[in-house]
Amino acid sequence: MDQKPAQKIDIDWTSCRGHGLCAELLPDHITLDEWGYPLVDGTPVPARTLKRARRAAADCPVLALKLTATGMS
Amino acid sequence: MTATFPDLHMSPRLLAPGGAPADLPTHEQRYGPLRHGDPAALLRSVAEAGLTGRGGAAFPVHRKLAAVAEAARRTGRAPVVVANGAEGEPASRKDKTLLALSPHLVLDGLQVAARAVGAGEAYLAAEEGVSYLESAAAHRRDPVAVKVVRLPRRFLSGQASALARFVGGAEALPTHQDPPVRERGVGRAPTLVQNVETLAHLALIARYGPDWYRTAGTPSQPGSALCTLHTPGSQPRVVEAPFGMPLHRLVPLNGMSAVLLGGYHGTWFPATEAAQLPLDATTMGAGVIATLPTTRCGLTETARVLRYLALQSAGQCGPCLNGLPRMAAAFRTLATPGPQSTTRTDLARWSGLVEGRGACHHPDGTVRLVRSALTTFAPELDAHARGLCTATDPTPLLPVPQEP
Ligand SMILES: Cc1cc2nc3c(=O)[nH]c(=O)nc-3n(C[C@H](O)[C@H](O)[C@H](O)COP(=O)(O)O)c2cc1C
Ligand code: SF4
Ligand code: SF4
C-alpha cells in the first residue's frame, strides 16, 4: 500500500526549446524527432531510471521536463 | 447574414422564434422564471439529463461541474465561471446566432453554472463586434454580476487555457495544462469554461428538468444541438436539431461528393457514407456540416483550410511550429495535379509527429482533418498524381479568413 504512484515524463511544449539534453540523459526513453524535439514513449518510468529522470528534469535548461503521476488527465 | 430556421427540425428550444432578438421581458415570458435549486440537486439533474459540452469535445457537463466544485473545496478558493462565446471556428455561426437571438438564455445558464460550483466571478467572453451583450447583462439582477470580455478574432482564442489567460489579463495563448484550467485557471482559481450553447441548455435543464431534456435526441445522446449548415450557393444556416437525426435530412446530399463534419478540426466523409450517418456528438464537433459538390476539389479545399490552420498556430510548441506549415505546404502540393514524389509519406510522418505533442489540441484537430481528407479523397489523390483533376469549378467554397 505504501507504493508511490507511477511517474511519467511530461513535456511543457510551450517551454521546450529542443535542446536535446534530456535525450542524452535518458536515451532509452527519449529520442529526438527530425526537428530536435523530444519523443517520449509515455510509459511509466521504471524505478531504476527514476533518479536519472529526476536529473534530466533538473538539468533541462528551461525546466520543460517534469515527472508527473500517471493516471491523471 | 445567417438565416435561421430553427422550427425546421423540432420546436426550437434555444433560438428565439422569428429571428428577432429576445429582450429580458420577452425572454422571461417565454421561458418563465429561473429557479436556482440547491447545487447538489442541480448536479444530479445535469447528470440525469446527460448534457455534454457543445464547444467541440462533447465532455459530460456534470463531471466538469463536479471537478471544479471539488477543486474549490480542496483549495478553499471560490471558482470562476466563463461562458465561451469565442467561436473561433470560421465555418461556425451558431454561438454568434445564439448570443444575438437569446443572450438571456446564455446569461441564465451562466448563473446556474455559477450556483452549481459556488463561483464568485462570472465572465461572458465573445468576439469583438457582437454588441448589446453588455447592456443585456446590465439589465439583469444576477446574484453573480457578469463581466463581458471581448476576445481577439483568432482560431485559438476560445481554447480553454487561452481563454482563461485572456480573462486574467494576459494574451489569449494556450498554456501547458498541468494542472488543468478546471483546477487552476483565471487568477489561479478553479475555473469552469463552458461553451455558450452548453450554458443555454443548462438554463433549460434547471427550469424544466432532465426528463424534459431527454424528450429530444436518443437515449445514449439525449438533447438537441445547434448546427451551422453550409450548402453551396446559399448562406450558412443555423438550425437546431436533435441528436440521432439523419444527416441527409439536414443537408441535401444529391450531387455532393463529400461532407465535412465538425469544422476545420473535423472529419471529411464521402457523401455516400454521410448519407448513412446520424447527427452524432462524437463526429459533429461544434456543429459545422459543410457539403462539397462533385464539381469542386476536396483536396484544394483542404489545402486552403490547412494553410489557415498553420497560420493560426500560436507557434509556441516546437512540433506544431515545425509540423503544421510543412503539412500545409505538402497538402498544397497534393492539391496540384502533378508529381507527388514523397509528399504522401512525408504528410503521414509529420501527422504522427505533431499529434499529441502540443500544449493544446490544435495539432490533433489538424491531423484529424488531414487523415480524413487523405482517405475520403483517395481517388482524387491518385488522379492528381496522374496529372488529372476532375473538378470543374475552381471557386473557393469553404469560408477561410486571411487568404492571399
Ligand atoms: C484550438 C481550439 C480552439 C477552441 N475554440 C473554442 C471556441 O471557439 N469556443 C468553444 O466553446 N470552445 C472552443 N474550444 C474548446 C474549449 O477548449 C473548451 O473545451 C470548451 O469551451 C468547453 O466547453 P464545453 O464543455 O461546454 O464544450 C477550442 C479548443 C481548441 C483545442
Ligand atoms: S532538455 Fe528540456 S528543452 Fe531540451 S529537448 Fe529536453 S525537454 Fe526540451
Ligand atoms: S499546440 Fe500549437 S496551437 Fe497549441 S499552443 Fe502549441 S503552438 Fe500553439
Image (tube, coloured by chain):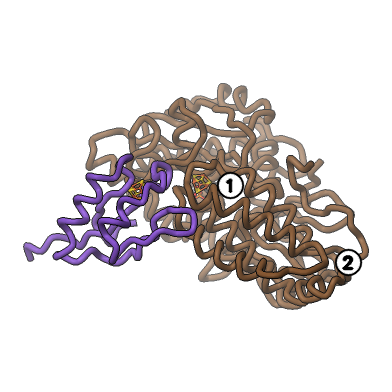
| Label 1 CB sits under 8 Å from any ligand 1 atom | yes
Image quadrant in which the C terminus of chain A is located: bottom left
Q: Residues within 10 Å of mark 1 (few under 14, many from 20)?
A: many
Residue B206, position as x, y percentages in the image: 47, 47
- B154 or B271, which is in the foreground? B154
Point out which mark residue A48 bears. Answer: none
The residue at the far left in this view is A2
Q: Alpha carbon of mark 2 to alpha carbon of mark 1: how far? A: 37 Å
Point out which mark residue B391 bears. Answer: 2
**Res. B51 in view:** no
Q: Earlier in the sequence, mark 2 or mark 1?
A: 1
Which chain: purple?
A
Residue beneath label 1, please? B197
Residue B299, position as x, y percentages in the image: 76, 63
**Colour chain B is painted in:** brown
Q: Is residue B86 left or right of residue B252?
A: left
Q: Nearer the viewer, mark 2 or mark 1?
A: 2
Q: What number of labels is visible?
A: 2
Q: Residues within 10 Å of mark 2 (few under 14, many from 20)?
A: some
Task: Report helix, strand or loop for mark 2.
Answer: loop
Mark 2 residue type = Ala
